[in-house]
Image (cartoon, grey):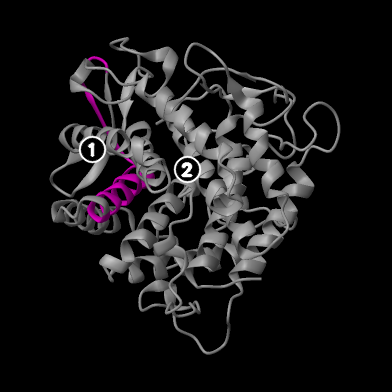
């Protein structure tokens, strides 16, 4: 589990919208009911997911948005704002916000998309190798530099290029590639460290090569591959393939094809399993398959998709089949990977229907009166300290927006 400088614990973008997930006009509109076990068909209700997404965004903007001062236009880390909170959120919650805002922009809503993407630059730290820091004062970046955070920014910048057609976003993606390369070495056989400041310190729990950093780097690199200059393609693909091979060799549980969390500098394996780690590898596998035409990548993605569903989806708290009730930001990453894989593995449709049922239940039972979501979407385990974080709202926003795109909705 991540241990950040900030209060929010590790919580589970595509941050960049995949054409295969967003443009299939044959998608059947999902109508909830039945706990997701049979697709949830009902004749009584049709959900407009994009309206729910926008309503959630408006609540977030009202309650988290900073209106005055040096960080006006940014968002607070928590609502209500805590006495120890910084003047703007850490980078991770801002990453999560931008994944949802990008979907709203695609759906046809006016959400100041270009301005909000540009605010990433306030987190940038121009060091020997430039990269984005974990915090900002509204003008310059500070704090640690995490390789997973930078890859998530990269995904969002690829999406910004697709939507806004400005090549400056490609230039910034190229810089992120260079930053990621600076995090790769031969310790433990290759791969990226989690954090720039925690490299190769055996026994320190933060000094590890994790599934999140390496999986998200692959997801970003293979997204960037689709739009980068031809002269960069071979190196970008080779980098992604190296990371993919290392992660399968070091962090794959062969018993169920689900991924463990990390390998410490001392060589030990943290065998905790989180939804987003398997999600990133599913997305990487299906993209590598389409780029290289090597079928083993697709077979591996399908095996992990099946394994992750079997491992994570249980009958919970009387709401029927459900994904984990904690860390929803992790879970939406798995679902977006399923959305990418579905054209090649139709069973993903059933996995997504279960999530849709969970999301509808959360809309009806897992929100406060102010429109904000609880971390636990069943609404039965309220935790004020975790519920107040921006990241929990990011998860709901991205989930609703992704479901709208999956159902081929638009404003």
Residue 409 at x, y percent in the picture: 57, 73
Q: Nearer the viewer, residue 252 or 408?
A: 408
Q: Does 201 sit left or right of 115 as displayed?
A: left
Residue that protrudes farthest toward the front in the picture: 231
Which residue is depicted at the point 21% across and 22% down? 268
Looking at the picture, how far across and down is residue 365, in whole percent? 60, 64
The secondary structure that most of the magenta stretch takes on is helix
- Point out the stretch of residues depicted in magenta: 265-290
Reading the chain from its start, which is encountered first: label 1 or label 2?
2
Residue 84 visible, this orientation: yes
Residue 220 image position (x, y, % from top left): 40, 41
Q: Is residue 130 left or right of residue 320?
A: right
- Observer able to see residue 383: no
Which quadrant of the figure has residue 310? Answer: bottom left
Q: Is residue 266 part of the magenta span, yes or no?
A: yes
Q: Residue 354: image x %, image y %?
A: 40, 68
Check residue 241 in the rendering and tell me which mark sits there, or answer none: 1
The residue that disc 2 covers is 155
Judge whether 46 appears above or below 104 on screen.
Answer: below
146 relative to 372, above or below: above
Q: Secondary structure at mark 1?
A: helix
Mark 1 and mark 2: Cα distance apart in space: 17 Å
Could you say which is closer to the camera, residue 377 or residue 212? Answer: 212
Is 75 or 156 nearer to us in this picture?
A: 156
> What's the residue at 58%, 42% (across, down)?
391
The answer to whether residue 301 is left or right of residue 92 is left
Residue at x-position 76% and y-position 42%:
65
Tag 2's secondary structure?
A: helix
């Amino acid at each position: 589990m991540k241990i950040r400088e900030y209060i929010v614990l590790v919580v589970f973008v595509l941050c960049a919208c995949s054409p295969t997930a967003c443009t299939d006009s044959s998608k059947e509109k999902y109508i909830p009911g039945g706990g997701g076990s049979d697709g949830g068909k009902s004749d009584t209700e049709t959900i407009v997911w994009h309206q729910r997404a926008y309503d959630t965004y408006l609540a977030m903007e009202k309650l988290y948005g900073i209106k005055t001062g040096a960080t006006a236009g940014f968002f607070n880390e928590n609502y209500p704002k805590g006495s120890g909170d910084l003047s703007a959120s850490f980078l991770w919650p801002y990453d999560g916000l931008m994944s949802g805002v990008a979907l709203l922009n695609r759906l046809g809503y006016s959400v100041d998309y270009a301005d909000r993407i540009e605010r990433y630059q306030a987190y940038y730290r121009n060091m020997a190798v430039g990269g984005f820091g974990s915090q900002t004062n509204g003008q310059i970046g500070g704090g640690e530099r995490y390789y997973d955070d930078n890859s998530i920014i990269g995904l969002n910048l690829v999406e910004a290029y697709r939507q806004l057609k400005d090549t400056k976003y490609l230039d910034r993606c190229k810089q992120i590639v260079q930053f990621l390369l600076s995090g790769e070495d031969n310790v433990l056989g290759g791969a990226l460290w989690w954090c720039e400041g925690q490299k190769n310190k055996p026994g320190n729990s933060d000094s590890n090569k994790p599934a999140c950093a390496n999986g998200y780097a692959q997801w970003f690199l293979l997204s960037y591959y689709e739009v980068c200059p031809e002269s960069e393609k071979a190196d970008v693909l080779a980098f992604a393939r190296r990371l993919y091979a290392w992660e399968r060799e070091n962090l794959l549980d062969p018993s169920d094809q689900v991924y463990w969390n990390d390998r410490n500098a001392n060589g030990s394996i943290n065998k905790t399993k989180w939804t987003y780690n398997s999600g990133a590898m599913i997305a990487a596998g299906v993209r590598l398959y389409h780029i290289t035409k090597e079928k083993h990548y697709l077979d591996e993605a399908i095996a992990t998709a099946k394994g992750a569903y079997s491992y994570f989806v249980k009958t919970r708290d009387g709401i029927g089949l459900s994904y984990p009730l904690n860390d929803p930001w992790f879970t939406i990453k798995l679902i977006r990977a399923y959305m990418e894989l579905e054209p090649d593995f139709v069973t993903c449709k059933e996995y997504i229907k279960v999530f849709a049922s969970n999301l509808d239940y959360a809309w009806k039972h897992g929100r406060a009166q102010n429109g904000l979501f609880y971390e636990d979407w069943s609404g039965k385990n309220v935790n004020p300290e975790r519920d107040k974080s921006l990241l929990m709202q990011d998860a709901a926003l991205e989930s609703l927006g992704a479901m709208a795109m999956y159902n081929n909705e638009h404003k």
